[in-house]
Amino acid sequence: MHNDNDIVTTFRNHLINQEGEEDAMKRVLCIAESCCDIIFGGLPRIPKQGEEIYCGHFEVKAGGGANTPMVLGRIGVPVRFLTSTGEDFFGGMVRKALQESRVELADTGIRAGSATPVSAVLSTKEDRSFVSYGGDGGDFVTEKRLEEEIRQADIVHTYLGYCLHYPISRLCAAYGKKLSLDTSCVDADSMEEVKEILRTCHFLKVNEEEAMKLTKESEPWRAAEALAAMGIEHVIVTMGAKGSIALCGGKRYEQPAISMGVCVDACGAGDSFAAGILTGAAAGLSMADMLKLGAVLSGMCVTWYGGVSDELDADTTRKRFREN
């Protein structure tokens, strides 16, 4: 059994030392396109075709691939973000949110003449729906730039879809970097190509539906075992209100969901959970504590609209970690 006081001390010392400066944590590089979320919250239901419904809450926030690096930056993890935004109004909002979250941008993140992806989020108490514009499409990073950024990082976090399009997994292997993957929802032409990429990752976070779809298994533990059998060192399966499970070195871990208050919006909860895993990896925490930190961060996330809030910082996170 671990000592909770030791966990809290370790978490504190790795994030901010007694002088209030960042300690020597491992450097995290996140790779993803950024999105601006237009959130219509507090809806009684999703409107039918031709129907108008008024929401109880409205705001515009950075979201999508920006969520995980913003959470990391706000709780004190040194994070660099390789992304792109347009020169438009929405891109300016995203860049401002990233800067306020202490995320270091690779270059400016601006792609000349392009439009920033935007999602309209329709959020009820039960779930949410999206209407999204994907921007102008096309590549947002060159292989040379990828190689430069990966070479300087310790841990690289991205989504499976980007690994199918860019040589991220190959470059991580070439430079001996730990690769963290979130599967998201990806439809690939070849499952063999997907499995080949999964075999190269060090941390895999996948929700139960995606895990069972990838492995053709009918329940989460069997899916986790099938993924671990590919050679993935850390397999983490999230299950919403049922918590999360993980397989690491043949050992099983279970973590209940942690409630931090009334759930108002689930947007960004998975990205916040991923930030907990990455923080633990950067700070050298155990898998049990990574799962707990992920549960704390995702539990906080659903109590506000959008992926991050000004309420999120290292002190609050440590306090919630200690209390649970």
Image (tube, rainbow, N blue to C red):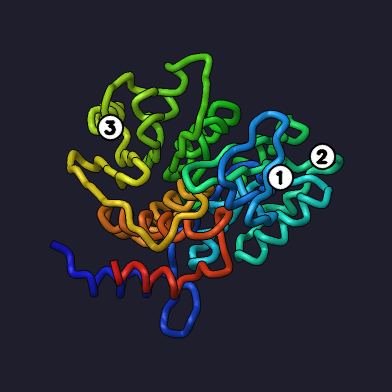
SS label for mark 2: loop
Q: Give the mark, 1 or 2, whose residue is nearer the N terminus.
A: 1
Quarter occupied by residue 208: top left
Disc 3 is placed on an element classified as: helix
Residue 298: x percent and y percent? 43, 54
- What's under tag 1, amino acid-wise? Ser
Q: Give the spatial CA distance, label 3 vs label 2.
A: 40 Å
Residue located 52% across and 21% down the image: 187
Q: Position of residue 41 (x, y in %)?
A: 60, 51
**Which residue is label 3 attached to?**
220
Q: CA distance from mark 3 to mark 1?
A: 35 Å
- Image quadrant where one finds the N terminus: bottom left
Q: Which residue is mark 1?
A: 84
Relative to 49, say whether 7 is above or below: below
Q: Amino acid at mark 2?
A: Ser
Crowd class of label 1 (few under 14; some 14 to 19; many from 20; radius 10 Å): many
Residue farthest to the right, as pictured: 113
Which residue carries the number 2 mark? 114
User: Which is more N-terminal, label 2 or label 3?
Assistant: 2
Q: Nearer the viewer, mark 3 or mark 1?
A: 3
